[in-house]
Each structure stands twice: as C-alpha cells, then as structure tokens.
Amino acid sequence: MDYRKEQNVFYIRIDKGENVLDTIRAVCRKEQIGGGFFTGIGACDSAVLSTYLPEKSDFIDHRIAGMIEMVSLTGNISCDKNGQPFLHSHAVFSQRRESGEIAVTAGHLTEARIGYTGEIVLTSAEKAIARKFDDVSGIEVWNLS
C-alpha cells in the first residue's frame, strides 16, 4: 500500500494480496481520521458481500472468487464506541462466469482482497463522526449531535 495526502483527500493504492478494508482502516488510524467517505475501483481475487436480514438482525454472506472487477466501492467512515475507525461500505463486482456471461454481485462489503491493484480516494471530514444505537431501526447509526 502506498498513499498521498493533498489537503483532506487521500489517494490510496492497495497492492496485490492486501485487504481493501483493512488497508483503508490502517490509513484512518495512522492519519487519525474519524469521519469521511471513500470511493474506489480495482481488481480483486476474492470478496465477501453481505445482505442484512432484519428479521434475524444478522447478515448472510455471499462469497465470490476468481478474476473479479471491483466496479464500484463506496463507503463512509465514523468512529466506534472505542474511538476506532468504523467503515460502512458497499461494493459492486463483475465476474465472467464459465459460460462467458458477465455476472454482477453487489451488497454490503465485508471483505475484499486485491488481485492486481486497488485505487481508493478517501476524503476526511473536519470532525469525527460517532455512532449510537437507534431504537427505531435496531442498529447503530451516525450520532450527529
């Protein structure tokens, strides 16, 4: 991984074999980023996308592997209750099936490993964004007060 900072924008290159979210978290820790957003593209060799099941208050995982293009990555950064970076991200991947068809898989990004390179643009906020539990939705949300 390598990155460059220009004002509050970070250009991050993620190298082959590195985990996308772990790398973004590492930059956030090093640069003390507690709020912001990121976007990216790249080529991965494995990924786990998840779908939230409200009736179970849990996720179901969808694993993909092979030559997969990370067509779109988007996410935001806030802080967990311990002040550590919390990433909430979604991604879209395309993959060529054995039949030759292109399959698209998308959802909440749980994990992705770079197969060639990843290019991420991260914009940090001026202040950290905390999280709080929301009784109505039953999940943690941004605490903007």
Image (tube, rainbow, N blue to C red):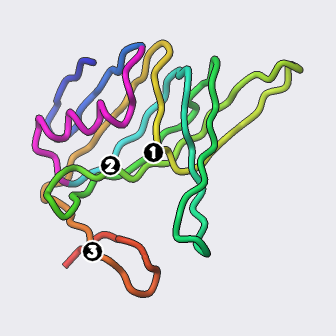
Locate the N terminus and report the quarter of the image it occupies: top left
Q: Amino acid at mark 3?
A: Lys
Camera-side residue of 5 and 101: 101
- Give the residue displayed 89% in from the left and 20% down from the top: 99
Residue 91 is labelled as none
Task: Work out whether 49 lies above or below 127.
Answer: above
Name the residue beneath numbered marker 1. Answer: 74
Query: Where does label 3 land, which residue?
Result: 132
Query: What amino acid is found at the position of numbered circle 2 in the picture?
Result: Phe
Q: Is disc 3 surrounded by few (<14), some (14 to 19) or many (20+) residues within 10 Å? A: some
Q: Nearer the viewer, residue 53 or 92?
A: 53
Magenta region includes residue 29: yes
In the rendered structure, find residue 37 and report the number of the disc placed on it.
2
Whether tag 1 and tag 3 are in contact, CB under 8 A, the answer is no
The image quadrant that residue 135 belongs to is bottom left
Taking 46 as reference, is 81 left or right?
left
Residue range of the region highlighted in magenta in the rendering: 17-34
Is most of the magenta stretch helix, strand or loop?
A: helix
Local secondary structure at mark 1: strand
**Depth-wise, is mark 3 or mark 2 nearer the camera?**
3
* Of 50 and 141, the residue lying toward us: 50
